[in-house]
Each structure stands twice: as structure tokens, then as C-alpha cells.
Image: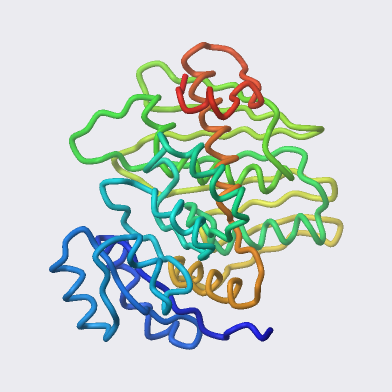
Amino acid sequence: MAMPNRLRAGVLGLGRRWRRCLPLLPGLRGVLEVAAVCDPRPGRAERAARALGCGVADGAVELLERDDVGALLLFDPPWYGLWPLEVAARLAKPAFCAAPLTADEAHADVLHEAVRAAGLPVLMALPAAAAPSLARLNWLLGNHLGSARLVRAERVLRPPEGRDVAAADLLSGPASLGLLHAAAAMLGGPPRGVRAGAADGFPLVNLLLDADHCAAQLSVWADPTRGRACRVEVVADRGTAVAEGPRKLRWRNADGEHLQRLPPLRRPRALLELFARSVCAGQAPRPSFADAYEALVTLRAARRSLAEGRRVEVAELAPDEASQGP
């Protein structure tokens, strides 16, 4: 049976994340169409429906049960969190999730089982997932530099104004989740163990991840004068590479030293287009829910390591235990 060339989706959550993506819709018209919208604030949903010329639904179930909705775009999760992904799994409707798994961590294990059992295609918009420099770096590893032996990564976060940030806070948000996902992708899979340590009197966490014949050293800290800065360095079998920010990549191999400045990429548009094209082609979009869940289990191991001052095996956190945290 021929696959459709344009995905008709239902949008749930019309808050901040949705407003950032709204201007992108005209450029996605060839692959994505909004069939209906839903929001806990009915007035906001009705205004959006009039502006888009689409339908409006009173709730997540009604939205996903519509015949003209073939997929879910979950932007700003309602007060009940990511539960709509369970509905999407039951109805076999692929989902794009802009909210991080840490937004509803208490139900992450149940969601993981529901998505896994249904074989549901879910694209999780993990931070850094669409950064051109990291995508190119992974391509270099797979095609020229060989397997990664050591990954070093630094991420600087800007804390909310007027708020003190403790080391443990750095392991609670989406930034650390995205960094762990990126490290696992370069290492070829999730690590076996994690050791976390914090600096005295400064919001800094260092993580050491060990895997088969490779390792990663990750540092996350808060600085009110900076933010969103990310640097990733990889030592591989046949060379080294450094991604500095989203667009700059340097590498060295047997052919010499190279520098590439990549064109700007609007991350939300790239992920939405990837989701729509993957679903229409019958392919599984990445990063998937399983990718985000693996990163979350590693993040939980890091929290336990920080609390207990020891190396923690990732396998120690069985699903029924992992939801309890450290």
C-alpha cells in the first residue's frame, strides 16, 4: 500500500513550545498538515483552530480518535504530563514529543513499556539531537574516524535569574538528558557504569561513563554569564574531532587537519520535518522514545552515584526501582 506523502497531525499543548514552531508551518506544508488542535484552555484551542483552519478537540483522547488525525504532535504537555503518549500507543498513532522525558519522569517507566509493547514510532526532541555539528561528528565516526575510544563533553547552563543552583539540580533537566544521549550515540550504546562527582562551593558536576573499550567524561555547570554552550571532543580509532557549538567542527585524521562551518539549522523545523518524512516513509524516527529512556536510566544512575559517592552500574536500576530515584 502506498504511503501518504503528507502527514496529517493533531497538536496537543499550544503554549510556549508550540508558539515557537507556529511560524515554521508554512515551510513544512509539503510534508505536514495540522488537522486538529487541543489545549487545556479551550479558548486558546479555538483561536488556534480558527487561525489554522483546522478542527478542535476537547481532550487528548478525542483528538487522537479523530479519523483525520494520523499522528500526535505533543508540544506543551498538560497538567497530566506525557500520558497522551499512552493513548497514541493504544491507537497506533505515531508521536512527536517536544517535551523532555524529565517533564513526567514519575510515569516514564509505564510510558516506556506502553510505547515498547505497541512498537509505536515516537520522536523525542532531545536537546542537541538536531545540532548540525553533532550529526556531522557522528557521520565522521561512522565513515572515516572509526569507533570512539574517549568522548569529552562540556555543557554550560544559564541558571534562572536570582536562583541558586546546586550540583544535584544539574542532573534534573533536559540538558543533561540530551548530553547523555549524545554521548551514548558516540560510544555506540549506553554505558555500563557511571561515577558522578560535584565541585565544592560551585555548581559543577563531572560524570565518568564507562563502556566496552571506551569511556566518556562529561562536565555540566551553571554560569549566569553564559548558557547553552556545548563542546564535544572525540578520540577515535583513526583520528580526533571537536564539535564547538552547533555549527563548528574540526577534525584530524591521516589526511591532515580539517575545519568545517556548517550552515544554520532551525532545530524545531528539522525535527518536525524528520518526523513527518520518517512516518510517511514507514521508518522509525530517531531519537526515539527508547533512546530518551536509555538516557534517563543513565541519568538516574548518575544521580545515585552523586548521592552515594560510588560508581553505579546502570543495570542496577531495574524499571521498578528506577522510578524511585537515588
In the rendering, at what x and y percent does residue 309 appear? 53, 11
Residue at 64% x, 51% y is 242
Measured along the vertical axis of the image, is residue 43 above or below residue 240? below
Residue at 69% x, 56% y is 138
In the rendering, at what x and y percent does residue 63 appear? 34, 67
Residue at 24% x, 61% y is 15
Foreground of the two, 272 or 220: 272
Foreground of the two, 131 or 287: 287
* The N terminus lies in quadrant: bottom right
Q: Residue furthest left?
A: 43
Measured along the vertical axis of the image, is residue 188 above or below residue 23? above
Q: How is the image coloured?
A: rainbow
Which of the 4 image quarters holds residue 215? top right
In the rendering, at what x and y percent does residue 229 appear? 44, 49
Measured along the vertical axis of the image, is residue 48 above or below residue 322? below
Foreground of the two, 195 or 55: 55
In the rendering, at what x and y percent does residue 142 appear? 78, 57
Please state if 49 lies on the left or on the right of 92 as rendered: left
Residue at 39% x, 49% y is 82
Measured along the vertical axis of the image, is residue 72 above or below residue 138? below
Q: How many marks?
A: 0
Please state if 78 lies on the left or on the right of 175 as rendered: left
